[in-house]
């Protein structure tokens, strides 16, 4: 008889319902794809209906379970209605976000409100609405918030963004404490600069690109694919004891 060995937890997400905000393109679409490929049913959410429907249709073309929903997560009433009228999800990927790079002395209240409104306020109430429905249905699961390396360090011209992403880290830790007794985990993924349609214009500035690459010790910009394994891990049984923490995917930026 062969000796017994520990059983590795499964990375399969079969039977789990997931929702990804800001899923029309870039990081959001990549994370939705990762969840779908691991077996989860995925709902792609964004303000632009055509983008998320295109993404969901592409996933369905490969045989994955995917649907789309148009939702402006800045509208808290609409967010609550959306989650109240859906079957409880097992997984939330809180991904929608924005940035307005500028020196702190240049920021106006409307800039602050725009960045904090989406990255912090909306993220809070999306997580709240999702968790309330999970608790009501008696479902356990995983809340995953897409933060940033800038939620762990400071950055020039990033005061607004840093404020919002540090807030997200703190919120996630507090969520973990409030929701632990319900079997709901809360963690963040904190990437470095990732090449996406939103960030591409920044890298057309050769000096900025050189500065960023100097700080990323592995010597390259991040790709959306660099985040796909982390979201599957945090969703899966392999991360069943992980809550209130952060996976920093920054190529060594914060190690210096």
Image (cartoon, rainbow, N blue to C red):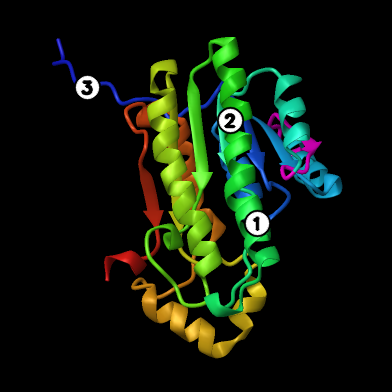
Closest to the observer, 78 or 237:
78
* Magenta segment boundaries in residue numbering: 61-74
> How far is the residue under mark 3 from the one under mark 1?
37 Å
Q: Earlier in the sequence, mark 1 or mark 2?
A: 1
Task: State the residue position of label 3.
Answer: 6
Q: Residue furthest right?
A: 50
Quarter of the rendering occupied by the C terminus:
bottom left
Q: Secondary structure at mark 1?
A: helix
> How far is the residue under mark 2 from the one under mark 3?
36 Å
Q: Secondary structure at mark 3?
A: loop
Closest to the observer, 112 or 215:
112
Dividing the picture into quadrants, the one containing residue 184 is top left
Residue 128: numbered disc: 2
Label 2 vs label 3, nearer the camera: 2
Q: Residue at x 55, y 57 (%)?
A: 224
Residue 32 image position (x, y, % from top left): 62, 41
Tag 3: Cα neighbours inside 10 Å, few (<14), some, or many (≥20)? few
Q: Residue furthest front?
A: 109
Dividing the picture into quadrants, the one containing residue 214 is bottom left
Residue 26: numbered disc: 1
């Amino acid at each position: 008889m062969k000796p017994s060995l520990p059983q590795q937890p499964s990375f399969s997400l079969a039977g789990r319902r997931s929702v990804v905000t800001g899923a029309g393109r870039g990081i959001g679409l990549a994370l939705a794809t990762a969840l779908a490929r691991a077996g989860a049913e995925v709902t792609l959410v964004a303000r632009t209906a055509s983008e998320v429907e295109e993404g969901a249709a592409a996933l369905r073309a490969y045989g994955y379970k995917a649907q789309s929903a148009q939702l402006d997560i800045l509208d808290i009433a609409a967010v609550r209605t959306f989650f109240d009228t859906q079957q409880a999800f097992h997984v939330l990927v809180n991904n929608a976000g924005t940035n307005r790079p500028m020196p702190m002395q240049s920021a106006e209240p409307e800039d602050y409100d725009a960045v904090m409104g989406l990255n912090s306020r909306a993220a809070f109430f999306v997580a709240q609405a999702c968790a309330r429905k999970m608790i009501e249905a008696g479902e356990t699961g995983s809340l995953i918030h897409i933060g940033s390396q800038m939620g762990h360090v400071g950055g020039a011209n990033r005061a607004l963004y840093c404020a919002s992403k540090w807030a997200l880290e703190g919120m996630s830790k507090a969520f973990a404490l409030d929701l632990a007794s319900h079997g709901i985990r809360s963690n963040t993924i904190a990437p470095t600069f990732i090449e996406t349609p939103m960030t591409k214009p920044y890298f057309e500035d050769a000096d900025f690109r050189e500065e960023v690459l100097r700080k990323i010790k592995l010597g390259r910009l991040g790709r959306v694919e660099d985040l796909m394994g982390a979201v599957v891990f945090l969703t899966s049984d392999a991360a069943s004891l992980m809550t209130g923490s952060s996976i920093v995917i920054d190529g060594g930026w914060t190690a210096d």
